[in-house]
Amino acid sequence: MHVLRLSVRSGLRAFPARLRRAGTELAVGVLIAMGAMLSICLFLITAYFVILFVIGIGAMVLPIVTKWVRWLTNANRRVAARSGIEIPVPYRPEPDEFEKDIVGWIRRCKWILTDPASWRDLLWLLLNSVVGMIGFLPAVVLYYVLEGFALAFGLWKPVLRAQGTGREYFFVPIHSQPTAALAALAATALLVVWAWYSPLFLTVHAHFCRLLLGPTESSRLAIRVQHLAETRTGALDAAAAELRRIERDLHDGAQARLVGLGLTLGALERHLNSESDEARRLLRDARTSSVAALRELRDLVRGIHPPILAERGLADALRALGLASPLQVEVRVDIPGEVAPPLESALYFAVSELLTNALKYSEAEHVEVIAWHDGTMLHASVTDDGRGGADATKGTGLHGIRRRLATFDGTIDISSPLGGPTDIKMEIPCVLSSPKTSSS
Amino acid sequence: MRVVLAEDLFLLRQGLIQLLDAYGFETVAAVDNGPDLLAAAAEHRPDIMIVDVRLPPTFTTEGLKAALQARREIPKLPILVLSQHVEQMYARELLADGTGGIGYLLKDSVFDNEQFIDAIRRVAAGGTAMDPAVVAQLMVSHARDQPLGALTARERSVLELMAEGCSNTAIAQRLFITEGAAAKHISNIFGKLMLPPDSDSNRRVLAVLAYLNA
């Protein structure tokens, strides 16, 4: 009894807030229901243009209609989020750019039609035209409540006079003061129920939306993979840009300052008179350690980001590797465009490592380095005429290359039978950008 | 002697101008990018151009490209290229026309003022000055060649100095041998590498570089 009294009291206190909330839900519900009416129209239009597209026309309209459809579905997703049900947007990301002509429009349609989410949207449009009507229910219930109060507070009399019988409220005809009081009681009870439970209708609709508008497991994974691929590329690009920045900073900073120091030391030496042998000796020491520091910095820079890669790009950098090797290296490169900097660097270091291996272990005389791009993949092969027996499981060199290429979804394939020859093929999926006319 | 200097870093440009000044060179133009270098070369017709490989606007091998371009416009224009790193490929491009008047040095070489100035004079006179690091790279890439393998250690040292651009006298001084001994080593080397003997020391150096660059 006590508990009941308590809950009634707290219920009374919460009542105004509940009423306000139910009022908002009512408005939202009406919007949902209007969306439902819109969805049947959109369903018909979309279906119409999908069919038109299939028979060859309508390519320019379908993307626009789809934009409207997605506007509606996204609005419903936002509404569902209000009810506490988050529905992630499942659409495949739009490709970066489309051609301006008809090819672009057709590609755009293909992007839409191959996305399962588009078809689930279509089904949702059809079903929502019925289910969405649920949105009207809070309004309907409130109307009934208000009708009850209106009848109870006097409207029953004119109705009775005009129609001869009392208007029924909750199946009870109202034709007297007591029945009117009963109607008032019933309306009050219904108002309480409305205030507390009408948001439920919206929740039901939100669940329905999640069923069709949310991502399926496979599209959720596809989105996740896409996201991971994008962030990985971003991370790799950022790292490569950082390395290039370090290389340039060293070149214009520490390295230049050391050379400047050398110039100063030289000037100092010129100004020394010939007697101060000790001072000359100290100067020589300073010079020697500065030269050593420069050499160390140079080696460091080569390990971070080879200057020739920054200055000449991949093709010349690979040729330079060939030139620097004591082996007879033939380098052929056919890459009609720019390779992304992180990839360029990975391939450079891989080829460098493989040439070192060939020199150290293979007893080869000739090595052939070929790099080319076939439109989707960057290929590189390093072939020598040595004694073979290269093994990726031994040593860290080949393993390191494999790991490094794997970061780009690249692979390395090693064929090195005992007795040779060793043929190592690398493949990395990549898209070329058009050749730069001037460096940015 | 009139010099056109191309170096984009203020600190180094000023330092080099001072150094050149101290040794009686006149810096007629000091520029900081490729296009200006070309313009200065055409305007001043200097006795030598001293050029940093990496220059604006591209920060690639702008300086190298501009220097070679200038040399096409003004044949035999002596060029001394400076860089923070040496590449055999660039050496090859510089030496491609085979006419001398080419220097390619690490910036480290300014530490030894005397040798650096010596190199400038040599290049201006139509000789060559290759950084020991360039020569070391050239030697490494020929490490497995038969004829080079047949050289004695002393002959290799002589060959390296010759590739750097040293005259008989300079080789003799550096190795503490007589000029006669140096000349003997040189003729042995030419014999073993099967290069035609030549009395002109610049042409001899170019022959050696051409051999090593092959």
Image (cartoon, coloured by chain):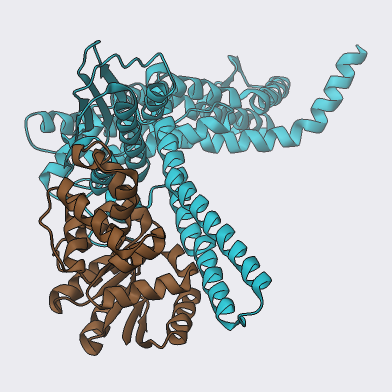
Chain colours: A cyan, B brown
Q: Is residue A133 left or right of residue A416?
A: right
Pick the residue in front: A384 or A428: A384
In x, y percent, where is residue A387?
A: 24, 17
Q: Residue at x 20, y 75 (%)?
A: B70
Pick the residue in front: B159 or A298: B159
In x, y percent, where is residue B23?
A: 43, 84
Q: Height in image: A105 above or below A162?
A: below
Q: State the count of labels.
A: 0
Q: Is residue A225 left or right of residue B58?
A: right
Q: Quadrant of residue A381?
A: top left
The furthest residue to the right: A2
Pick the residue in front: A179 or B126: B126
Q: Is residue A292 left or right of residue B188?
A: right
Q: Residue at x 13, y 63 (%)?
A: B198
Q: Residue at x 28, y 65 (%)?
A: B168
Q: Height in image: B45 above or below A276?
A: below
Q: Residue at x 16, y 58 (%)?
A: B207
Q: Quadrant of residue A113?
A: top left
- Quarter containing the C terminus of chain A: bottom left
Residue A34 can be seen in this image? no
Residue A440 can be seen in this image? yes
Q: Height in image: B57 above or below A170?
A: below
- Quarter containing the N terminus of chain A: top right
In x, y percent, where is residue B149?
A: 25, 38
